[in-house]
């Protein structure tokens, strides 16, 4: 069977990239934007940077900001109703994964109304029509939602996150402007950056990985590991490199899948509202240890990409340990907690483990797993 690879039609990279929104919209004949952005970005003036670009050229838009950090079914349904009333003909998603995931779900449902319950979009839904066109403007360097075919919506009624995978939802144009990320606080920069590293590492070792995706993931690991510390310190170089690195990671994992780091992180977000990047960063080294036996020589290349010296002289056991230690060191340096003791309640572990096993990311794990294995992994982290 052939390997499929799906990417944006167009992407713009670098400082000032948001200025290209107007010529792209005009060139495509768009008349009015439905702008999805979260309340904090609106409050702190980040969203306004894009709105100012639109205002400067007299471009019509309507702002929708009823979006939670872990967007819910209700957020999407409210957004669908608002879009229908707005008279818009395209979407602009400004933010991290929350805004973009909401926009993707809205765009899919508008053109596929039979999925208006939202929950039927979970997994690989049999949608017929492409989403309403989406322009994506990331404000975090982590999720890479601007270049992926995935989105995640929380089903509050069941305390679980639904992973939705649909090539019809990918934004048509991405505007990856590091200046839009410069106001991210240190904690968010660290968490989203470790999310990006998790994408790159899980994508590199996932069961569906192949030569083309490996190219993207190894380069992403290299860029992220050299730039995340600088981004947390808010250096222009660090911000610019992280904007690129997380995007490159997204180009890869969107097409080959992830693994149980993500499937274990998702229920933490649903049950405790744990920031996704923090959950991934804490879980990643432990799952890397668990998966090591199923990864061949790939941990050597991870270690090399993270600038570990002398990997060619190491035994398999040594370079696997070196890769895991390099991830732990980076996570520690940017202030990520070492365990889940302050997050997970022991009595919730059976629910968390079953939710993780049922998660859409779990089948991509390079090592066959079970509810019992995942239970032990959670227990080892508290």
Image (spheres, rainbow, N blue to C red):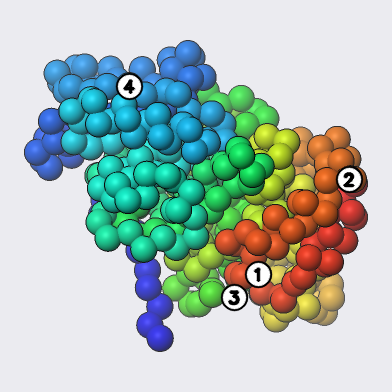
Contact (Cβ within 8 Å) of mark 3 with mark 1:
yes
Which badge, 1 or 4, comes first in the chain's sequence?
4
Q: For the point 23% across and 25% down, which residue is it? A: 86
Q: State the separation of the CA atoms marked 4 and 2.
A: 41 Å
Disc 3 is placed on an element classified as loop
Return the residue at label 2.
347
Contact (Cβ within 8 Å) of mark 1 with mark 4:
no
Query: Looking at the picture, how far across and down is residue 204, in whole percent?
Result: 58, 68
Query: Looking at the picture, how far across and down is residue 9, in whole percent?
Result: 25, 54
Contact (Cβ within 8 Å) of mark 2 with mark 3:
no
Q: Quadrant of residue 334?
A: top right
Query: Looking at the picture, how far across and down is residue 18, in whole percent?
Result: 30, 32
Instruction: For label 3, count other residues whose C-alpha is less than 10 Å away and answer few (under 14), some (14-19) or many (20+).
Output: many
The reply to whether residue 245 is visible in this rendering is: no
Between 66 and 115, the one nearer to me in the picture: 115
Disc 2 is placed on an element classified as helix
Q: State the separation of the CA atoms marked 3 and 1.
A: 6 Å
Return the residue at label 1.
365
Disc 1 is placed on an element classified as loop
Q: State the separation of the CA atoms marked 2 and 3.
A: 32 Å
Contact (Cβ within 8 Å) of mark 3 with mark 4:
no
Return the residue at label 3.
207
Q: State the separation of the CA atoms marked 3 and 4.
A: 40 Å
Contact (Cβ within 8 Å) of mark 4 with mark 2:
no
Which badge, 2 or 3, comes first in the chain's sequence?
3
Q: Is residue 60 above or below residue 372?
A: above
Which badge, 2 or 1, comes first in the chain's sequence?
2
Depth-wise, is mark 2 or mark 3 nearer the camera? 2
């Amino acid at each position: 069977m052939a390997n499929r690879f799906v990417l944006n039609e167009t992407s713009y990279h670098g400082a000032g990239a948001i200025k290209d929104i107007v010529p792209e919209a005009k060139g495509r004949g768009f008349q009015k934007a439905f702008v999805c952005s979260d309340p904090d970005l609106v409050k702190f003036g980040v969203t306004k940077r894009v709105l100012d670009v639109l205002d400067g050229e007299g471009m019509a838009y309507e702002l929708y900001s009823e979006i939670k950090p872990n967007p819910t079914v209700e957020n999407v349904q409210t957004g669908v109703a608002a879009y229908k009333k707005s008279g818009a003909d395209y979407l602009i998603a400004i933010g991290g994964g929350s805004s973009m995931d909401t926009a993707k779900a809205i765009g899919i449902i508008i053109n596929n109304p039979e999925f208006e319950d939202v929950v039927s979009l979970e997994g690989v839904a049999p949608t017929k029509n492409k989403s309403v066109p989406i322009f994506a403007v990331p404000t975090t360097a982590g999720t890479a939602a601007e270049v992926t075919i995935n989105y995640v919506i929380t089903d509050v009624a069941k305390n679980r996150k639904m992973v939705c995978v649909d090539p019809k939802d990918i934004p048509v144009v991405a505007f990856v402007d590091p200046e839009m990320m410069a106001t991210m606080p240190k904690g968010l920069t660290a968490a989203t950056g470790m999310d990006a590293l998790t994408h790159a590492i899980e994508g590199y070792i996932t069961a569906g990985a192949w030569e083309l995706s490996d190219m993207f993931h190894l380069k992403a690991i290299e860029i992220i590991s050299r730039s995340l510390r600088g981004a947390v310190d808010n250096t222009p170089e660090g911000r610019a490199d992280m904007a690129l690195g997380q995007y490159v990671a997204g180009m890869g994992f969107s097409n080959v899948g992830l693994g149980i780091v993500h499937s274990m992180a998702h229920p933490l977000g649903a049950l405790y509202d744990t920031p996704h990047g923090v959950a991934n960063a804490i879980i990643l080294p432990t799952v890397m240890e668990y998966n090591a036996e199923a990864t061949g020589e790939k941990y050597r290349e991870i270690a090399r990409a993270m600038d570990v010296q002398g990997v060619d002289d190491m035994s398999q056991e040594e370079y696997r340990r070196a890769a895991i230690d390099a991830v732990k060191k980076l996570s520690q340096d940017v202030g990520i907690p070492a365990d889940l003791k302050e997050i997970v309640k022991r009595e919730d572990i059976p629910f968390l483990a079953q939710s993780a096993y049922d998660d859409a990311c779990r089948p991509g794990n390079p090592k066959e797993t079970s509810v019992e294995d995942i239970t032990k992994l959670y227990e080892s982290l508290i």
